[in-house]
Amino acid sequence: MKIAEATVARLVMYHRLLCRLNDEGQRVVSSNEIGEILGVKASQVRKDLSYFGEIGKRGVGYHVGRLYDHLEEILSTPGKWKMALVGVGHLGSALLGYKAFDTAKYGIEVLFDKDPQKIGSEMYGIPCYNIEEARIVTKEHGIQIIILAVPPGVAQECIDTVLQDTGVKGILNFSPTSIIVPDNVLVYNVDISVELEKLLFYLKQTMINI
Amino acid sequence: MKIAEATVARLVMYHRLLCRLNDEGQRVVSSNEIGEILGVKASQVRKDLSYFGEIGKRGVGYHVGRLYDHLEEILSTPGKWKMALVGVGHLGSALLGYKAFDTAKYGIEVLFDKDPQKIGSEMYGIPCYNIEEARIVTKEHGIQIIILAVPPGVAQECIDTVLQDTGVKGILNFSPTSIIVPDNVLVYNVDISVELEKLLFYLKQTMINI
DNA sequence: TTTTGTGAAGTTTTTCACAGCG
DNA sequence: CGCTGTGAAAAACTTCACAAAA
C-alpha cells in the first residue's frame, strides 16, 4: 500500500515524540495527547498508525516503548545509507556539523567542494575531494544519497555528473533551485526561502483581513 | 479567496524562474515550458496563475517581464519585515550568511544567543544579545518574525518568552521539534531530518519493489 | 493554429462518527 | 467507560478537456 508523504512526515514526528516521552518515563500515551503536542488531529494520528497494523489498546492508548519500537521498525533502513555532501559552504558546513546527519541509519562519507583550501583536507574526520572528481569518488565509495548544498547556478551540472553511471538513488536538495533528474532518482527539496515566503504570504493575508 | 499552501510554494518557484528567464533575455514563456523546467503539470501552472487574474495571452503564452512583475506584486509585503534570529550555532550562522535572508522585503535585525562570546558582538553587522533579554529587545526593535535555530530542548521556552507581549506574528522553525503557540501566531517548520527520513522511506520502498 | 483560462471530473488527504474491544 | 481502528463523508488538491481568444 502506498503511504502518503504527509503521513511519513508525521510518523517521523511521532517517532521523535515517543523517544522523548520514553526518556521522560511515560508509559502510555493516547492519540489525543500525541495530537495535542504535535498540532495534529487525534483521528489523523490513529489513521496514520493504523496503516501498519493494530498497535494500540482500546480503552487504554498506546504503550510508549512498544509504539516507539514499532515506528523504529517502520522507519528502519536495510543497512546504513552512504551519503555525500556536495558543497561545503555556509550551509553545507552547518549540515556537516548537524548531529542528525550522522546516525546508525546514515552518515556522510565524503565531501565535495571546488575550494582548493578545502580539497584534500578533512572536516569532522570526513575527507573533502575536488568536485571535479565527484563522479568517480561517488562510484568508488558506493554513495547512494547526495546532499546538495551548492549555489543555484551550478546545482544542475553537479547533479548531472554525479548521477552519471553511479549508484546514486536519492538527492536531498538544499540549493534554491529545482533540478531535473531521471525518474528512477528521488529528489526532496528543502527550500528555505520558499518556506519564508509562504510564511510572509499568509502573514500579509491575515493582516489585511483583520 | 484562500490560496493553498502548495500553490504559494509554486508561485515562489515561478517567480524565481521568471527572474532567471528575464536575465537570460527570454521574452515569452508558456505554461508548458514553466512546467517542464519545474517538474509541474502545465495545467497546474495555469490554474495557479489564474487565481490572480488573466495574465497570459492565448495562443502566445506569458510575457516574461510582465508575469515576473505580477508575481512580484503577489508576493510583495507591506513594508520590510523585521526578523530576529534566535540561536547562532552551526545552523543559525549558516542562515545568517544566507543572502536570501536579507532582501528589500525582510532582513535579520537582531541575533540572540546564550554564548557569552557572542553576546555583545556583531556578526555581519547585526548585534547579538543575550537570549535572556529576548523579550524586551524583540519588543523594542519591533520584531515581527522569529527564525528559530536552537536545540530542540530549549525551543519551546525560547518561543514562550519571545511571544510574551511582543509583536511577533510568525515563526520559521528550524529546530527539530514542534512548538506550541497561540493561534494568532503562524509557524512554518523546516525540518531537515524529516525530509531526509521521507527520502529514505521511499528509497527503501522502491528498493523492495524492484 | 497555438496556448490560455476554467468548469468539471478525478484523485488524494483529512475528518467524522461510531462499532468494537479491553 | 474510554480509546482505538476504520469505513464513509467531506474537504482539498490536481488533472482533464475544451471553449475562447490571439
Image (cartoon, coloured by chain):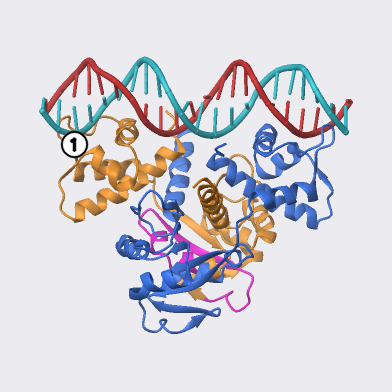
Chain colours: A orange, B blue, C red, D cyan
Does residue B163 appear left or right of residue D14 in this picture? left
Residue A186 appearing in the image:
yes
Q: How many numbered marks does the figure carry?
A: 1
Task: State whether residue A196 is above or below residue B116.
Answer: above
Task: Please tell me whether residue A113 belongs to the stretch shown in magenta.
Answer: yes
Residue bounds of the magenta highlight = A93-121
Picture residue at 29% right of the left edge, 47% below the top: A37
- How many other residues sit within 10 Å of disc 1, few (<14), some (14-19) or many (≥20)? some
Q: Position of residue A107 (x, y in %)?
A: 43, 59
- In the depicted view, which residue is nearer to us: B84 or B88? B84
Task: Please tell me whether residue B97 belongs to the stretch shown in magenta.
Answer: no
User: Which quarter of the image is occupied by the N terminus of chain A?
Assistant: top left
**To which quarter of the image does residue B40 belong?**
top right
- In the depicted view, which residue is nearer to us: A190 or A65? A190
- In the depicted view, which residue is nearer to us: B11 or B110? B110
**To which quarter of the image does residue A140 belong?**
bottom right
Picture residue at 34% right of the left edge, 65% below the top: B158
Q: Position of residue B62 (x, y in %)?
A: 79, 41
Q: What chain is tagged by disc 1?
A: A
**To which quarter of the image does residue B151 belong?**
bottom left
Amino acid at pointer 1: Gly
Q: Position of residue A36 (x, y in %)?
A: 28, 44
Q: Position of residue B187 (x, y in %)?
A: 43, 52
In the image as oriented, which residue stretches furthest toward the front? A210
Task: State whether residue C22 is above or below residue C20.
Answer: below
Picture residue at 57% right of the left edge, 39% below the top: B3
Residue A179 appearing in the image:
no
Picture residue at 58% right of the left edge, 46% below the top: B9
Disc 1 target residue: A61
